[in-house]
Image: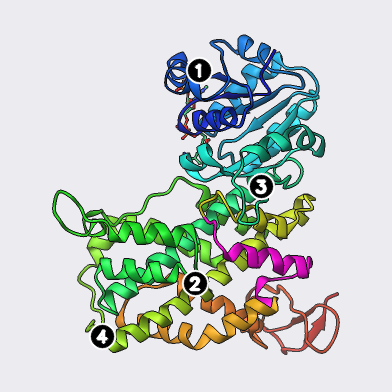
């Protein structure tokens, strides 16, 4: 046995990850259900490093140094179970199965438990950065046991992206499914970021009256400031692109129905289970599904809306500056919600996740990589118990300075009939969190009226019920 690591599942992600290991001097065993993929990898890229191609599961396992480290990069779901069932009987106690697919964290909890009973470490690992990241340095979020990270961490860190300060974008997130959970929330935040950027584009297009090329320039400018991020950078690229066939802006020839593979939906479903409000992510998921409902949209197309005259050039410029503020403030809110969700799950599942470390490893490699993440890292470094990012002095000050612009952008959007569910939900969340009193008191009264659900009082301890159908006297129930 000569290989330090093995990769099974050699579609785009697996083969790029294997090449990344090989390029960093590791000997990599490679395997795929269909051997043609293994052969193609060796034919095309065998010269990049030391690969050990294996046709069968037995050959693959025999090629790995002990304790064996075997990465599964197959389609998430049943295929992952099929591959685990195939390999687990061939492994010894202390060996490690690393699942780098986009597994649902509940599957990871189940798989980890089953394999732990057999003495095998199961390391559910989030990997972000797409194909390009897998090859040149992804952000890596491994869960699993502390022991497995000792044997695996250095290898993963060697191929991970590097943050601007040179540290690897890989850290042990926490036990069992912590890594896949955090990867899921990463993708949820990615949905929210993309939605906010899309809303900013829509406003610049339909209120400021800018053409896509001009908007690309605006995003390029924003990308030199506090919004500096991969997603803003690629947004400018997409907007500047001209369709070769028609000569029109590319964005105008693409069907306006956004698709999704499911991790955003999982984030929202899980947030509902945890009771954590992640309205920014939820609005982003719903905005994608709404866009895909051609039937509903056609049925509603004739409904009346306000007039949409565009602004003068000077007004447009001023408006664009306000959109930047609204985008930034909304982004802070959606990250606050995402981190809140990670913190809640960490407590619920006993993961003890270092919230600042999550921000630190997302500074490079992943889709939401941004200068901004370093701010989150330092906010948690200053106060590891920070209840919400909005309570961090730096973020609070910035959002406070942005609030007038934020409100005026949302008001303008409403006035002009441009949908901004992300900006609006973020602002509503901000106002609800900072409110002295919420109308939830009335909700409690209603619940007590129709269902005797009881309420608590502001002035006395205990649980109370008002006899609404009778004399309306108050009874103490506990
Ligand atoms: P796919 O998700 O398209 O999966 C194809 C691979 O799965 C092939 O190697 C295929 O083998 C194998 N496979 C499918 N079913 C089985 C089975 N029953 N038994 C054995 N092998 C099977 O590949 P990707 O490279 O796109 O993604 C791999 C994983 O990485 C997925 O879980 C994905 O969610 C995750 N991921 C993907 C990202 C991306 O940007 N694409 C980013 C981050 C994570 P065969 O060749 O024999 O058909």
Residue that badge 2 annotates: 225
Spatial CA distance of label 3 from label 4 is 45 Å
Q: SS class of the residue under badge 4?
A: helix
Residue behind mark 4 = 313
Q: CA distance from mark 4 to mark 1?
A: 59 Å
Compared across the picture, whether 200 is left or right of 279 comes to left
Mark nearer the viewer, 3 or 1:
3
Q: Against 116, is 472 above or below?
A: below
- Magenta-span inclusion, residue 163: no
Mark 1 beta carbon near ligand 1 (under 8 Å): yes
Q: Nearer the viewer, mark 2 or mark 1?
A: 2
When asked about the image quadrant of residue 216, the answer is bottom left
Q: Disc 3 vs disc 4: which is toward the camera? A: 3
Residue 433 percent coordinates (x, y): 64, 79
Q: Which one is earlier in the sequence, the residue at label 3 or at label 1? A: 1
Separation of marks 2 and 4 at Cα, in angstroms: 23 Å
Dot 2 or dot 4, earlier in sequence: 2
In this view, the residue in front, 351 or 332, is 332
Q: Which residue is mark 1?
A: 33
Q: Position of residue 409 (x, y in %)?
A: 41, 82
Circle 3/circle 4 CB separation < 8 Å: no
65 relative to 242 in the view: left or right: right
Q: Is residue 390 visible?
A: yes
Q: Which residue is mark 3?
A: 168
Q: Residues within 10 Å of mark 4 (few under 14, many from 20)?
A: few
Q: Find the magenta span and give its range.
A: 368-391
Residue 275 in sight here: no
């Amino acid at each position: 046995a000569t290989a330090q690591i093995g990769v099974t599942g050699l579609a785009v992600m697996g083969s790029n990850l294997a090449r990344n290991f090989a390029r960093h001097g590791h000997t990599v065993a490679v395997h795929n259900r269909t051997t043609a993929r293994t052969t193609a990898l060796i034919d095309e890229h065998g010269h990049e490093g030391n690969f050990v191609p294996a046709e069968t599961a037995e050959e693959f396992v025999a090629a790995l140094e002990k304790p064996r480290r075997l990465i599964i990069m197959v389609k998430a779901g049943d295929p992952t179970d099929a591959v685990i069932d195939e390999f687990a009987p061939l492994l010894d106690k202390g060996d490690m199965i690393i699942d780098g697919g986009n597994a649902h964290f509940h599957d990871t909890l189940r798989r980890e438990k089953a394999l732990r009973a057999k003495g095998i470490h199961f390391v559910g690992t989030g990997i972000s950065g797409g194909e390009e990241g897998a090859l040149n340095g992804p952000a890596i979020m491994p869960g699993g046991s502390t022991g497995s990270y000792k044997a695996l961490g250095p290898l993963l860190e060697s191929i991970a992206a590097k943050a601007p300060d040179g540290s690897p974008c890989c850290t042990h997130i926490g036990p069992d499914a912590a890594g896949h959970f955090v990867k899921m929330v990463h993708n949820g935040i990615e949905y929210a970021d993309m939605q906010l950027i899309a809303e900013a584009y829509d406003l610049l297009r339909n209120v400021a009256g800018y053409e896509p090329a001009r908007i690309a320039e605006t995003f390029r400018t924003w990308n030199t400031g506090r919004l500096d991020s991969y997603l803003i950078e690629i947004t400018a690229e997409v907007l500047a692109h001209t369709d070769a066939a028609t000569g029109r802006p590319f964005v105008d020839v693409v069907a306006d129905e956004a698709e999704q593979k499911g991790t955003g939906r999982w984030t929202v479903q899980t947030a509902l289970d945890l009771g954590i409000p992640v309205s920014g992510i939820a609005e982003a998921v719903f905005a994608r599904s709404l866009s895909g409902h051609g039937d509903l949209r056609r049925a509603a197309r004739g409904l009346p809306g306000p007039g949409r005259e565009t602004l003068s050039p000077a007004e447009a410029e001023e408006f664009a500056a306000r959109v930047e503020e609204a985008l930034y403030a909304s982004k802070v809110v959606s990250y606050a919600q995402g981190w809140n969700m990670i913190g809640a799950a960490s407590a619920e599942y006993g993961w003890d996740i270092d919230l600042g470390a999550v921000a630190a490893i997302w500074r490079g490699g992943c889709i939401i990589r941004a200068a901004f993440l370093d701010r989150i890292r330092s906010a948690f470094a200053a106060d590891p118990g920070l209840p919400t990012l909005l309570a961090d002095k730096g973020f609070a000050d910035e959002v406070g300075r942005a609030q007038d612009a934020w409100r005026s952008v949302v008001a303008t959007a409403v006035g002009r009939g441009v949908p901004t569910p992300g900006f609006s939900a973020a602002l509503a969340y901000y106002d609800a969190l900072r409110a002295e009193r919420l109308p939830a008191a009335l909700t409690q009264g209603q619940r007590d009226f129709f269902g005797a659900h009881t309420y608590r009082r502001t002035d006395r301890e205990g649980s109370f019920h008002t006899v609404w159908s009778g004399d309306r006297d108050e009874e103490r129930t506990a």
